[in-house]
Image (spheres, coloured by chain):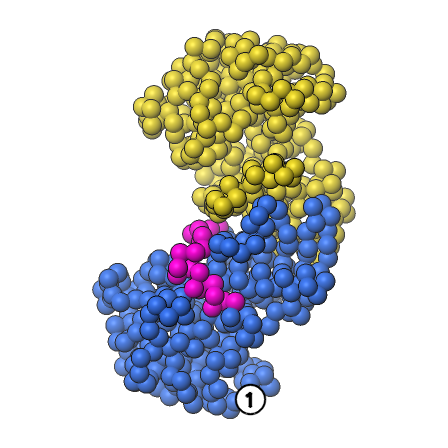
Chain colours: A blue, B yellow
Amino acid sequence: MNIRIVTEEELRRCVEMDNESLEAVEQSFVSLSKGEATVPPIMRIPVPERTGEVDVKSAHIHGLESLTIKVASGFYENLQRGLPSSCGLMVIVSAETGFIQAVLLDNGYLTDVRTGLAGAIAAKYLAKDSIGTAGVIGSGAQARYQMRALKLVRDYRRLLVYGIVPEEVDRYISDMSSVLSVEIFRAKSAEEVVRNSDVVVTTTPSRTAYLRPEWLHPGLHITAMGTDAEDKQELFPEVLGRADRLVCDRKSQCLRLGELHHGIEAKVISCDSRLDELGEIIAGNKPGRESDEQITVCDLTGVGVQDTAIALLAYNKAVEKGVGLNIET
Amino acid sequence: MNIRIVTEEELRRCVEMDNESLEAVEQSFVSLSKGEATVPPIMRIPVPERTGEVDVKSAHIHGLESLTIKVASGFYENLQRGLPSSCGLMVIVSAETGFIQAVLLDNGYLTDVRTGLAGAIAAKYLAKDSIGTAGVIGSGAQARYQMRALKLVRDYRRLLVYGIVPEEVDRYISDMSSVLSVEIFRAKSAEEVVRNSDVVVTTTPSRTAYLRPEWLHPGLHITAMGTDAEDKQELFPEVLGRADRLVCDRKSQCLRLGELHHGIEAKVISCDSRLDELGEIIAGNKPGRESDEQITVCDLTGVGVQDTAIALLAYNKAVEKGVGLNIET
């Protein structure tokens, strides 16, 4: 049996945040919403003694030649020791034979890409066609990926950024100025970002809501992607109540882990509220934004189909380019 | 970051079915039963269009330096194409940092070893001290591992084997004669095996019960390891009812996936029936066999702690021996 081992550096040469990757992730959302994917619940292995956790996500998109299993860890105490807080790999398994075809040692790179792209997909269907200013709350890795991905779907000119650590915001502005051809401004508050942007992406690991309903304005689109666990929250539940269009990546998951579950608990929305999945909108079965005045909110928790889509794209490119190490086992 | 990739052939040089491995798996059962392990439910990804499935098992044994995640596939149509039906690997993750330390490309070898050893552990505590004849039903890989492992704990002299494919039984007898220093006899039926053995291990993937209560006799120990899914069954429920001691690897799992759940459904045993875990017996908190006349039954479904125990043993040996390939990523 031959197994291909591909490193992060090699994967970066195979997959970028571009339209081809965007298309792959879009199609995975369509498969998900059509029921054409098997997505088991996330496996969580908490390591409380180190404030860490290891998550396993998987998805089999019916009809694709392979399925994937992703292992991703988050150990936040690492940061105090100057180490990265996350790590991960993806395993590619043949859907024909069950044989393991490849191990992608991506250190979370593919997750970063597919997560950034999901934000872009939300904006593609839910933001106004023409936007001047984009805003981002948080200044970490996803604040970078989200704003780069957004450029694929909207040609914004100004970027407002707010983060709680001034030096990190400095670094963000310096890094991103060379990547994005936009003017980047430091905001004094999350409020300033929201009040002055057409699209806002929230990317923090906050455990208390900070984004207030009174900051919303006609035409605003918010993508909330920081909240992916029961105890995280960025939006006050009333923000969900004020939205004209409420969308998510996967209903069952967002009602358990995302912003939506706080909305349900606060009784601002109910399980019967009109709530669409991105895949339904991409497939044209549900409308996206319907006017320039609507307020739209998209809750993203991250779904295994995204991993499968991006991992298979990477794997096929690696095979095509002959990249990676073949191990006979 | 450095990740060690170890192939099956290298792993076979690191871990064998010996007393050191037995001890590691025993200790993992103790941790499980003491509540000193985090074992999430098995993740199943069915691939019905190929009669296949991919399972993910994991366990964090508290206090150990690493945890593991196992990916194992079973695609039974492969056999018709002359391909192996199973495949798998183990991922070693640091419990200190969440960093991935190693990928063990074991093709299921470590699972075979830890599964064989679990059978030996069951016999160690539940079989009579001195046994003359061991019996095995089925003639596949586990029929081999089980009988080799049993030799570690009981010096049996005769082996009875029954399988439904005569050529496979021929091969079994020929292969095992050179491995085990025992006389091996072909039985004409499962009944002949059970009636004439002191220890019986059932290793088939049967979906209908075949082992009948009227075949039981004083002093018999049965390890039922073939049944690891809701729709598999080897023992008639009354066999469980006739047992003086009923033991399993993990209660919650056997009551859902193992022989025990058929016993509950048939109302032969109840959730309140006296049912002990192997780990409780190993720790000395519950008795093993109490007399040479008792009939004992152990239901094994396979638990993530066994994988973690054997994988860490293999990983530590690989590091010690400098075996495997280090990949910088």
The answer to whether one can see residue A143 in this image is no
Assess whether residue A41 is covered by the magenta stretch. yes
Q: Give the left or right position of residue B213, taking residue A260 as reference.
A: right
x, y percent for residue A265: 26, 61
Q: Name the residue located 72 percent from the left edge and 37 percent from the top edge.
A: B12
Q: Nearer the viewer, residue A99 or B133?
A: A99
Q: Percent x, y for residue B214?
A: 43, 10
Q: Quadrant of residue B310?
A: top right
Q: Residue at x 26, y 60 (%)?
A: A271
| Left or right: B145 in relation to A195 | right
**Hey, which quadrant is residue A170 in on the image?**
bottom right
Horizontal and vertical percent position of residue A166: 50, 82
Classify A33 as above or below B90.
below
Drawn side of residue B185 relative to residue A297, left or right: right
Residue placed most toward the observer, A300 or B96: A300
**Could you tell me residue B183's position as x and y percent?**
69, 12
* Left or right, residue A212 beside residue A14: left
Residue A273 in view in this figure: yes
**Residue at the front extreme of this rendering:** B80
Identify which residue is drawn at 31% across, 79% down.
A290
Q: Specify the amino acid type for callout 1.
A: Ser
> Label 1 neighbourhood size at 10 Å, few (<14), some (14-19), many (20+)?
few
Which quadrant is home to the N terminus of chain B?
bottom right
Above or below A279: residue B18? above
Q: Chain of mark 1?
A: A
Specify start and end residues of the magenta stretch as a single range: A24-45
Question: For the residue labelled by badge 1, is the local secondary structure a helix, a strand or a loop?
Answer: loop
B196 up-or-down from B52: above or below:
above
Q: Residue drawn at (53%, 22%), measured in percent from left and top?
A: B202
Quarter of the image with the C terminus of chain B in it: bottom right
Residue occupied by mark 1: A181
